[in-house]
Amino acid sequence: MAGRAMQAEEARIFGPGVEHRARRRLRSFRRSWKALIGGTILLVVVLAATLAPYVSPYNPLDQRILDRLKPPAFAGGTRAYPLGTDPIGRDVLSRIIHGSRVSLAVGLSAVLIGGSLGLTLGLLSGYYGARLDMVIMRIADLQLAIPFLVLAIAIITVLQPGLLSIVLVLGLSSWVTYARVARGQVLSVRGRDFVEASRAMGGSEWRVMLRHVLPNIIAPVIVVATLEVGRMILAEAALSFLGLGIQPPAPTWGGITADGRDYLGTAWWISTLPGIAILLTVMAINFVGDWLRDVLDPTVIL
Amino acid sequence: MGRYLLERIAYSGLVVLGVVIVVFAIMRLTGDPTPLLLPIGFTQEDLQRVRREMELDQPLHAQLRSYMTKVMRGNFGKSLRHHDSAMALVIERMPATLWLTAAAMAVTVLVALPLGIVAALRRDSLVDVAASAVALTGQSMPTFWLGIIFILIFGLKLGWLPTSGSGSVRHLVLPSIALGAFSAGLTTRLVRSSLLEVLSQQYVRTARSKGLAERLVILKHALRNAAIPVVTVVGLQLGTLLGGAIVTETVFGYPGMARLAVEAVFYRDFPVVQAFVVITAIIMVTINLVVDLCYVVLDPRITYA
């Protein structure tokens, strides 16, 4: 009995070191189910995007005005339009399937642009330090003083809204997160023995940076990049919802939601269903990101 | 401390100046900024006249100088749509946006603190799993969609709360929850992980082994130390909230400066847009200054001598 009490006291003082078996199981399950569910959903979304013209029942732009505002099959509609139709008789399911193309394309290319820019600047900033570091970090402060969507609005007023300006705006204004993470990591490996050794063996600055520093800092950057794909998809959807993103009639998840706004009382499905597609996709990405973090680098707090 | 404060204020001023230069540069993204200062459907003569009046035919550095002088006096030009000072228009709508943002920040903190703390203290329990699920959902939902769901359920179906306009606390409920959901999710996860990290530190172990009551260990040793990263992130969330206000104000027809800016974009009313960007930046640096000063209160090790 005294042993039990002692053990409980130990657990209280030392924290989660002394663990119950059931809890340990729960935790290891928590790790893998995220990857499993997230991966499955993402696979479906990617397949839908690549095979959009083959799997969607209709052309997303075809209007059948006689069939306008038909409810989804599960809410009293017909099987002909599984998720109903919009105010000008376009099939909502086909539009959502095609909308996944825009979301994925914008999300991935924005992360590619922002990630490579941020990684490069963070790497240089952390590696060379001194004046370069100061300049880059001051620019980062400047960037952070203008919230993302606010900057996007300003740029889109000047350029015309469209796929290219969206990708550029999102990509160019998201570099700071990557740069900060990369810089912090570089600072922590810069003085390590293997870096010194490579330098002592006559490795050029570029060689040291690319062959020795980069591989050792890349894991947290990959984690951040994964989570950022979700954030970029949310941002694109918000801009398209406002009418400042990809222009109609092209189907986008944010745009379809906006199409249904005036019909909330009578045709709730138009605005609510694309949001579920966004929610599921972004959540799946966050699951995968969390799992990657647990596996690759548990120290990153996000 | 006084000197540090002065330096920080000076630096904040520089950041705002930098933002003004960024806006100046954005105006010139297409080469000629003159069309941005004219209403849609302008004539060639208008173009020439405004170009002369605004000194846009001068070399770039001269343009920048005259631009800066005007902006310093709060002169962002006249709104192309309302024919009123752009700055005055934005300032007039600013309080509504600040209220909305503050309310969303309150939602964030009121949800994230209790949920994150309970999740960390009952790590791997069902409560923890549930809190993580709620937090992740909040982080994955588009703000505009949550707003629309709220309007559908609480406005149209149940009729409990107003779904547009402003003027009372009741008007703020739905928009602030919709706006705060994303930040609340993110902050919950951060409170949890930061408290867990602190709980594994030596000083917590020491406090426990000297027989301190668990409540005191948590309150005096753990929470205070966990507060520092949390304050940082809550400060950073301000940007998310101010940006998100653009969407929330549009969904709920809320008359703040962010909605004014969105309308301005459709009219290509650049003077209003630029005033909005600069005012937002001023709010951002001011709050960041306050956050920095909070560190001094929270962490006696930081003195900024």
Image: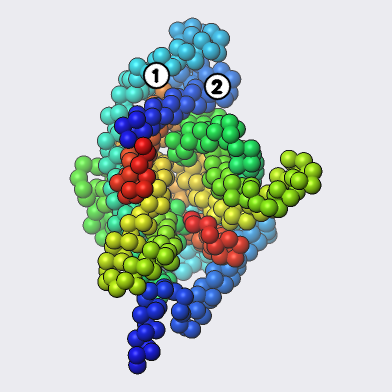
Q: Which residue is mark 2?
A: B28
- Foreground residue among A152 and A182: A182
Q: Secondary structure at mark 1?
A: helix
| Chain identity of mark 1 | B
Judge depth for marks 1 and 2 and give the one in front: 1
10 Å crowding of disc 1: few (<14), some (14-19), many (20+): some
Residue type, mark 2 in image: Arg
Q: Which residue is mark 1?
A: B71
Residue at mark 1 shares a chain with residue at mark 2: yes
Q: Residue furthest bottom?
A: A1
B166 relative position to B281: left or right: left
Q: CA distance from mark 1 to mark 2?
A: 17 Å
- Foreground residue among B81 and A155: A155
- Foreground residue among B222 and B86: B222
Quarter of the view holding residue A247: top right
Residue type, mark 1 in image: Val
| Chain identity of mark 2 | B
Q: Secondary structure at mark 2?
A: loop
**Contact, CB < 8 Å: mark 1 with mark 2?**
no
Quarter of the view holding residue B95: top left
- Across and down, in percent, residue B92 comes to 27, 29
- Across and down, in percent, residue A115 comes to 61, 45
- Across and down, in percent, residue A84 comes to 49, 60
B261 w.r.t. A114: above or below: above
Q: Is residue B175 visible?
A: no
**Which of the two labelled residues, at mark 1 and mark 2, occupies the earlier sequence position?**
2
x 51%, y 10%: residue: B62
- Foreground residue among B94 and A53: B94
Residue A186 - label: none
A270 w.r.t. A177: above or below: below
